[in-house]
Image (cartoon, helix red, strand yellow):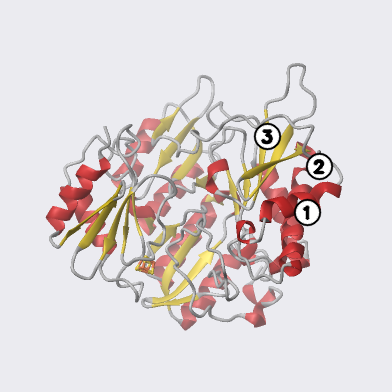
Amino acid sequence: MAVADLPGLSSRANAQGSPSTSGNDLHGSPGRSRPDACPGALQTHPAADGAVARIRVPGGILTAAQLRELGAAATALGSGVIELTSRANVQVRGLDAEGEAAFASGMAAAGLLPSATHERVRNILASPMAGLDGRGLIEVAPLVRELDHALCARPALAGLPGRFLFALDDGRGDMTALGADVAFVPIPAPAGGEEVEGALLLAGEDRGLRIALTRAVPAMMAAAEAFLAERTAQNSTAWRMAELDDGPATIATRLGDFAGVTPPGHRTPVPDLSDMSAPPPLGLVSRPGRRATLVVMPPLGRLTTAQAYALATAAEAGDGEIRLTPWRGAIVPGISGADADSWLCRLAATGLVTDPASAWTGVTACTGRPGCAKSLSDVQADAASSTARAGLPLIGAQTAGVLPVHWAGCERRCGRPTGRAVLVVGTGNGYRVDADGRSLHYQDIEETAAAVATARRTG
Ligand code: SF4
């Protein structure tokens, strides 16, 4: 579909005063005084280095052809880099006015912009390793498609804030700690197993609502509609369910009459999955009798066009798809076991991280200079040079005893990870390193790098 054919195109407008475009918006804030202005492909964000366009990728699932189109568009129209976000979406920055229109047209033609009215609300996370490693209880890809179609088919849900987040967990628990507004997580069936049942989590909370797998998507739609109704009832401009007064409780009450939802009192407990919200290990995932899976990560979540093309080529030798992860990685399923090592080497040759012990694991950074006018430093360059000089080979964050580290150009600390982490914040006169309640300031980048390396080691 060409972009000119999309309904609602005439409403194209740049988002003014948008919050960070560094791609992590998992952190809600109470007391919103204005509608959200998350960028999309049509409603872009004017940054210091040009417009930023964000493409929603439900479930993080892209075809090889779509990734090629993204790479080509990023090079021809933008900065040449595809930024991966913490919602497994993608964004391209550095677009000029002509480039914005051409980018949107290209994305529409590639099938990445199926609805102009709902483009910014298609925020759907899903367990990226579902069906690939023997863990989990269900396939999530069919649910992702069903949820996306149901969302786009309901005109009222175009009114959801661009921050509102859905999540579909395959039962391993990797989505449950990401704080989605509405999430479905299946529960292991009792012995003798009947129909698969799951919990409907609201703002990450288990309010005791249970639903059959076959009714999961309608229930999630009902929860989203209940959020909008409650927002109106409270005369609120909340972006996230947790920002409403007693948000999860009031939404759970509104869902009490929804057909198929088992109210509190008849519930099977959700297993404790709190320690399972971790990225899949980088490298090769092999299972006897099955095709292999490649798991890689671009440094700082910035995918070059060459890396995008290499991933697309690998995917064409596999199942034809790439799955992006909320940890800013990429997964290529369906690779022949005999060729898997060779493909991994080819991806590593483009600069993609394939070693779980790499010093790049667990290192993230906000946009910083020159893309963000608020930034006090070029945090991406400093994070890269610090990682290179910190002397942290073979103790990456996927090895026990090493904390993730996030670099930010100002106190907003956009993109900071959830949970325990080292934060490195630009001050205009060096960096402040925050870890475990202690803050130390350094003017010299070598001293900063050494301090970061020390702070990341917990063992
Ligand atoms: S410099 Fe500040 S406002 Fe800009 S992206 Fe980084 S943390 Fe956010």
Q: Nearer the viewer, residue 84 or 424?
A: 424
Mark 2 C-beta to ligand 1 under 8 Å: no
List the single residue furthest toward the top: 192
Q: Would you say the residues marked 3 and 2 are in contact, meaning their CB atoms lie under 8 Å apart?
A: no
Question: In percent of the image, x 16 and y 48: which residue is there?
Answer: 450
Say if 395 sits above or below 405 in the image: above
Give how far across and how far down residue 353 sits, in percent.
33, 43
User: Left or right: 198 with respect to 335?
Assistant: right
Q: Earlier in the sequence, mark 3 or mark 1?
A: 3
Q: Which residue is mark 2?
A: 261
Quadrant in the picture for the C terminus: top left
Kind of residue indicated by mark 1: Ala
Q: Would you say the residues marked 2 and 1 are in contact, meaning their CB atoms lie under 8 Å apart?
A: yes
- Marks 3/1: CA distance? 18 Å
Q: Which residue is mark 1?
A: 222
- Marks 2/1: CA distance? 10 Å
Kind of residue indicated by mark 2: Val
Q: Nearer the viewer, mark 3 or mark 2?
A: 2
Question: In percent of the image, x 18 and y 69: which residue is there?
Answer: 429
Binning the other alpha carbons within 10 Å of mark 1 as few (below 14), some (14 to 19) or many (20 upward) gives some
Q: Which residue is mark 3?
A: 186
Q: Residue 93 lies in what quarter of the image?
A: bottom left
